[in-house]
Image (tube, grey):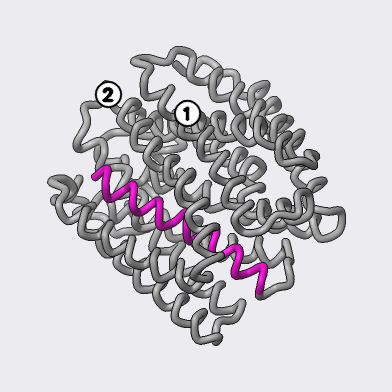
Amino acid sequence: MAAGGFVSFLAMNMQMITRGWLVLRLSDDSPLALAAVMMSFSLPMTFVALVGGALADRMPRKHLVIISQAGNALMTVIIGALDVTGLVTFWHVLVIGFINGSLMAFNMPSRQAMLSEIVPEKNLMNAISLNNSGMNLTRIVGPALAGFMILFVGTHGVFFAVGGIYVFSVISTMMVDAGKSSASKSRKSVWGDIWEGLKYASSDQGRFGLIFIMLITTLFGFSYYALMPAWAREALNVQSDGLGILMTIMGVGALFGTLALAALSNVRHRGLVMIASSIMWGVSLAIFSQVTSYAMSIPFLLTIGVISSILMSMTMTLMQTLAAPEMRGRMMSIGMMTFGAMPLSSLPFAFLAERTGTPDSLMISGILLALTTLVFAAVYPGFRRLD
């Protein structure tokens, strides 16, 4: 399970950097084009994730993971072939990104829910944090590796390598002794299961608060993910290897955050910790956006990595521990659905970046994250008491 997850996220992080660099080449360094490609990958999660979550609760989760990873391997090899032959266009990247995102929407709810089948509930936060540590390690290795590989083998060479990594992930998942049977025997339709999951998520203040705080961090906190290549060009004038190092530094912070969380046996006052983390994330992003030197960017990248990883790990843990076993796939899919809302912010901020510059656009994004979190904490006091 750990090996399959690690190589899967390694492939995804390498693919994201390579896809972004290819789009910069095809679009003459357009921030809007970067946001559009991010939208093509993320937006399907908003619509397809609910179906993926319902299927994860009524079908063998292991089978869904294997099929989706095999599909990602095929799509990545296709974009590599189009690239090496010189036939690739911006529209090819958009369409294949949409397919990749749809497959990920089937993959992630099943992969995350399989953890609860392997690990006792009392150790679930530690297990999820360790799993996220592996994911964050790929944020260190993946971008740097892809950035340097682009210099030597081109974007097409990286795409072919990523396709091979996805195949290895399929083989690793086949060896996992979990997720081989359905979590529930639902007599409803898929849409009936989806509706039941939505009602279940909104019926409890803790579950509803988790979804809301995940939504606001997605809308305003992850704007940098789509715009980082453009910011790196404008603020620091770096090449692909420099961009890879920037993303690696953020991955180092994320790895440190998840390892620290995994080492803690019990975290108290989780609601307050998540609110404070979200505010700090917004402030750090706003300040980071105005940095104009490599050295000055490092502490802020590390801080954003630490804070975002802690917040995401705690959210994913509570989404499972606050849900009944037969509802965990659907709860995880709703979390993915909020994460898929990233284009709702990345596209407007990309429009803003085209007019005011990427640094100012990211600064506004960070300020909105901090302010929205403060408003949420004020009007939803029940979340602050979540323990």
Q: Residue at x 51, y 15 (%)?
A: 385
Q: Residue at x 35, y 26 (%)?
A: 125
Whether residue 4 appears in magenta in the rendering, the answer is: yes
Which amino acid, by three-letter code, is at mark 1? Answer: Phe
**Is residue 343 shown left or right of residue 238?**
left
Would you name the residue on which mark 1 appears? 256
Q: Residue at x 62, y 59 (%)?
A: 240
Q: Earlier in the sequence, mark 2 or mark 1?
A: 2
* Tag 2 secondary structure: helix
Q: Is residue 182 above or below residue 279?
A: below
Main structural element of the magenta stretch: helix, strand or loop? helix
Q: Which mark is residue 123?
A: 2
Find residue 281 and report its horizontal and vertical position in percent: 64, 31
Query: Mark 2 or 1, which is nearer the eye?
Result: 1
* Tag 1 secondary structure: helix
Find residue 70 and report its horizontal and vertical position in percent: 29, 67
Q: Residue at x 35, y 58 (%)?
A: 106
Residue in the foreground of this view, choosing between 326 and 44 = 44
Q: Which residues are magenta?
A: 1-25
Find residue 293 and report its horizontal and vertical position in percent: 77, 40
Q: Which mark is residue 213?
A: none
Which amino acid, by three-letter code, is at mark 2? Answer: Asn
